Amino acid sequence: MPKVDPTHVDVHGNPIMVDIAAKAVTLRRSVARARVMFPPAVGAQLLAGGFIGKKGAILHTAIVAGVMAAKRTYALIPFCHALALERCDIRITPDTLGNLDIECECALSGKTGVEMEAITGATIAALTIYDMTKAMSLEIVVCDIRLVQKSGGKRTHGAGKI
């Protein structure tokens, strides 16, 4: 196994936030996805009702929650830098069964990436949907949370235009 050179540990073994002061500012973009799967009857009911539930407009609420979470990722993940996002778009697409695909795209001109912000935005949007629909079923599944694209900085991930 190759030796790991820790980036978030000082010479004394204490946890630290990475110093990005000397890094160049570049355009950083990331896209993350999550999926919410419903039992067939629940998905059909939500689709037929335009995703309006007892708690209100499910998709609109999830979009707002996802953006709010992405903007505050630093407060949730210990060594994330506080970033001034310049873009955060949440897109939620239902399939023919009423299951939902959530995509969060974050971007900024900065010294560090926005992967965690995109993943957090997609995840919290999915959890908000779960919260707003859990009274209909406890068999709802939040799954497939993942980074699908990243550009800017040292590494690029994923194919296609972001």
Image (cartoon, grey):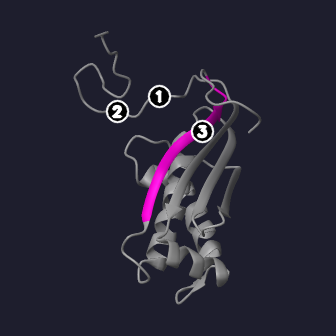
> What amino acid is found at the position of numbered circle 1 in the picture?
Asp
For label 1, the residue is 19
Query: Which of pointers 2 and 3 indicates the residue nearer the eye?
Result: 3
For label 3, the residue is 148
In which quarter of the view is residue 153 placed?
A: top right
Q: Residues within 10 Å of mark 1 (few under 14, many from 20)?
A: few
In which quarter of the view is residue 52 placed?
A: bottom right
Magenta residue span? 141-153
Tag 2 secondary structure:
loop
Tag 1 secondary structure:
loop
Res 82 seen here: no
Q: Residues within 10 Å of mark 2 (few under 14, many from 20)?
A: few
N-term mark: 1 or 3: 1
The residue at 34%/21% (across/down) is 6
Given residues 32 and 69, the one toward you in this image is 32
Given residues 62 and 100, the one toward you in this image is 100
The residue at 74%/39% (across/down) is 162
Q: Position of residue 48 (x, y in %)?
A: 66, 82
- How many discs mark residues in the rendered view? 3
Q: Of all residues shown, which one is farthest toward the front? A: 40
Q: Which quadrant of the figure contains the N terminus? A: top left
Gap between marks 2 and 1, in whole Å?
9 Å
Give yes or no for contact between labels 2 and 1 (Cβ–Cβ under 8 Å). Answer: yes
For label 2, the residue is 16
In which quarter of the view is residue 78 placed?
A: top left
